[in-house]
Amino acid sequence: MVKRVSLSHAPCPVARALDVIGDWWSLLIIRDAIEGVRRFSAFQSSLGIAKGMLATRLRALIERGIMTQAPASDGSAYRDYVLTPKGQALHLVIAALRQWGEEELYETDEAHSVLVDKHDSLPVAPLILRSADGRTLYWSDTQVQRVGD
Amino acid sequence: MVKRVSLSHAPCPVARALDVIGDWWSLLIIRDAIEGVRRFSAFQSSLGIAKGMLATRLRALIERGIMTQAPASDGSAYRDYVLTPKGQALHLVIAALRQWGEEELYETDEAHSVLVDKHDSLPVAPLILRSADGRTLYWSDTQVQRVGD
DNA sequence: CAGTATCCCCCCTGATACTG
DNA sequence: CAGTATCAGGGGGGATACTG
C-alpha cells in the first residue's frame, strides 16, 4: 500500500478509492468479509495468502476505517475482523466486479461448474445504474425502466 | 500484472475480475478511457504515468480484450486506444468506485472543491442494487422501491 | 490459533535515452 | 508525437521460524 505517489488526496473520487482499496488482496479480503468470514485463519485459508501479508493488509484496512476488531463471536479469547459501515458500503463495488466477471470472463462451457462455488452461493444481485435525473434505470446499457420518483 | 498466482481461472468471478483489472493503473486508464481519453499522450499526461508502464498496461489491456486500437479520430497517422464492449461494461465498476469514494472519502469542507474537477463533470449516476428476485431496489442499504416485474 | 519477525527474491516502477 | 530499450532501486509478497 505504500506507493510512490499517494492518491489519498487526489481530486478524483475514483483515484481516492483505488488508493484505499485498489490493491489485489484488499478487495479479496473485503469480498470474504462481506460473505461472512471473520477469523484470521479463515481469511488465510480462504485466500491462500501469507500470514504476514494478511496481517499487514488487515492492519491497513483497520487504519483506513474499512474494518475493525470485534470480540470473537464464538466466545474465544481472540477477536474477529469485521467490516465497518464504510467497509460494508463496498458491497456495491464487489457486486459490480462480480457481475462483470460473470458476464465477461467465463467460457460458456464452464459456467455451470462455477455456480457451485461457495463464492457464488450468494444471491445474484444485478446492478442497475440510475440516470442523472434519477428517473431512468439502466442495466448495463439497456434501459429497463422509468420510475416516477 | 505478472503475479505469483494467477486468478484467471479462479472459480470466483470477483477473483477473476481482479486478476484482469485489479491493479491500480489499469482501472485509472479505464476510467480515463470511459471519460473519452483516447491518445497515448493524453493518458500519459492525465495519469502522470511513465511511458514504459503505460505502454505495458495498454498492451495488457488489449491482450485481455478490454481495449483495442482504432484509427485516430483526428485523421493523424497514429492510432487511438478505445474500449471494447467488454471494457465499456466496466463502467459499472468505475461508477461503484466513484460513488463509494464520493460518499466515504471526502471531508465535508472539501466536497465542493472536488465537484469542479474534470473527473466529476460527468453526470452523477447512483448505483442501485437489485435484489435476487428482481423486484426490490436498494440504494446502499436502503430500500428505495419495489418494481412490478 | 493468532499473529510477529526475518530473510530474500522478483518484478514493479520510474528515469533516461533512443528510434521512427 | 508515439512509442521501445535499458538500467537501478525499492518494496511487494512468499516462506519459514518463532512467540504467546
Image (cartoon, coloured by chain):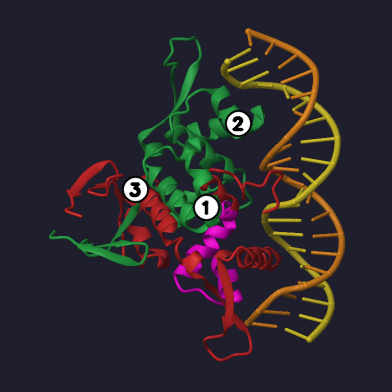
Chain colours: A red, B green, C orange, D yellow
Q: Amino acid at mark 3?
A: Glu
State the residue at coordinates (69%, 48%): A3
Q: Which residue is mark 1?
A: B7
Q: CA distance from mark 3 to mark 1?
A: 16 Å
Which residues fall within the magenta stretch? A20-46
| Residue A4 on the magenta segment | no
Q: Main secondary structure of the magenta part?
A: helix
Q: A136 or B110, which is in the foreground?
A: B110
State the residue at coordinates (38%, 49%): A100
Q: Secondary structure at mark 1?
A: loop
Q: Which residue is mark 2?
A: B54
Q: Locate the N terminus of chain A by quadrant.
A: bottom right
The mark closer to the camera, 2 or 3, is: 2
Residue D20, position as x, y percentages in the image? 78, 86
What is the chain identity of the residue bearing mark 2? Answer: B
Q: Are marks 2 and 1 on the same chain?
A: yes
Q: Which residue is mark 3?
A: A103
Q: Is residue A22 left or right of residue A60?
A: left
Q: Secondary structure at mark 2?
A: helix
Reply above or below: A113 against B45: below
Reply above or below: A69 against A12: below
What is the chain identity of the residue bearing mark 1? Answer: B
Q: Amino acid at mark 1?
A: Leu
Asked whether disc 3 touches disc 1, contact meaning CB atoms under 8 Å apart, the reply is no
Q: Residues within 10 Å of mark 1 (few under 14, many from 20)?
A: some
Q: Amino acid at mark 2?
A: Leu
Q: Is residue B109 visible?
A: yes
The mark closer to the camera, 2 or 1, is: 2
Q: Are marks 3 and 1 on the same chain?
A: no
State the residue at coordinates (48%, 10%): B76
Q: CA distance from mark 2 to mark 3?
A: 27 Å
